[in-house]
Image (tube, rainbow, N blue to C red):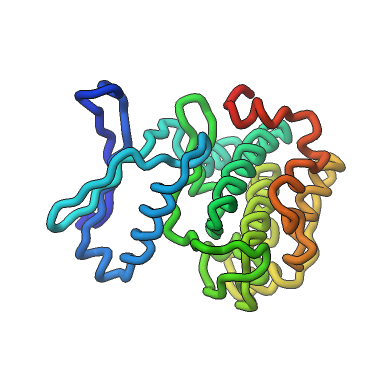
Amino acid sequence: MIYNQVVLVQKRTGVDSGSLFALKILRKQHLLKKRQVERTKTERKVLTVTNHPFIMKLHFAFQTHDRLFFVLDYCPGGELFFHLSRFRRFPERVARFYTAELLLAIGHLHGFGIAYRDLKPENVLLDAQGHVKLGDFGLAKENIWDPCQGAKSLCGTPEYMAPEVLRQIGHGLTVDYWGLGMVTYEMMTGLPPWYTTDRNKLFKRIKRAQLIIPDFFSESAADLCSWLLERNPYHRLGVGGVQTVMAHPFFRKLNWRNVENRQL
């Protein structure tokens, strides 16, 4: 039995006639059974209030007696995870491109008091031009305005969880900069830092093990990852807001207006 599915659809009338979209179909019975109602409500609300070139857009939403339907951007490029698996690791310039676009997406969410909390390559899709579209907002948390406090739940994908989430001491917006550091490191090496299939070892490493920076990282890439993956959220790069990350030397050669206008 397929409870949730995504199918490709084409708009037949109106201004966007002929355009392709992704239709996400959710069975209400499954949402109730799996206690996914609140996550689905959160995802719909986040998608409704945000409007950004690097965030998945909700074009329409409707329902029947037993199903919910979300009409979303169609991303023929697939998951960033697929491309990373194919190439093993990206050159620094490619990692910089994706990191910059993700950073702007995160900054946009934070401007609405939304902590994303599940940044990983599987949740980053690529559109027809190769630009990112951040999707899957089921773990997002609203009304988070403090960089280090506001949420307490243990949530996320184990390999990418921030130390403060694992310790359940409270977390805020800087949890997403940890996630950005994890993804940037993975794009440049092929695996997240501290990776192991042993869950207990993984959590211990995330909380205490030294971050190993490969020799082929440039000085600015090494510095960016080290500060994004600072275990103390009050000292982490990004605690002062998205602009502090944008100003890092890793992005020195980027024109941020061109990045946001998708002109790279």
**Residue lying at 23% horizontally and 24% vertically, measured from the top left:** 14
User: What residue is drawn where x is 29% and y is 46%?
Assistant: 70
Residue located at (36% from left, 66% from top): 38
Image side of residue 9 versus residue 107, left or right: left
Location of residue 155 with respect to 57 vertically, above or below: below
Q: Is 59 situated left or right of 190 in this image? A: left
Q: Is residue 74 above or below residue 69?
A: above
Quadrant of res 151: bottom right
Residue 86 sits in which quadrant?
top right
Question: Farthest left residue?
Answer: 65
| Quadrant in which the N terminus appears | bottom left
Kindly indicate the quadrant of the structure image that contains residue 239. bottom right
Counting from the top left corner in percent of width and height, residue 69 is at 25, 47
* Residue 244 appears in view: yes
Residue under the image location 64 percent in, 44 percent down: 103
Quadrant in the picture for the C terminus: top right
Report x, y in % for residue 227. 79, 55
Residue 75 placement (x, y as % from top left) = 42, 34
Q: What is the total number of numbered labels drawn onto the structure image? A: 0
Apparent side of residue 185 relative to residue 43 in the rendered image (left or right): right
- Looking at the image, which residue sits at the far right? 219
Along the line of sight, the residue nearer the viewer: 109 or 7: 109
| Percent position of residue 215, x then y | 84, 45
Locate residue 116 relative to residue 62 in the image: left or right.
right
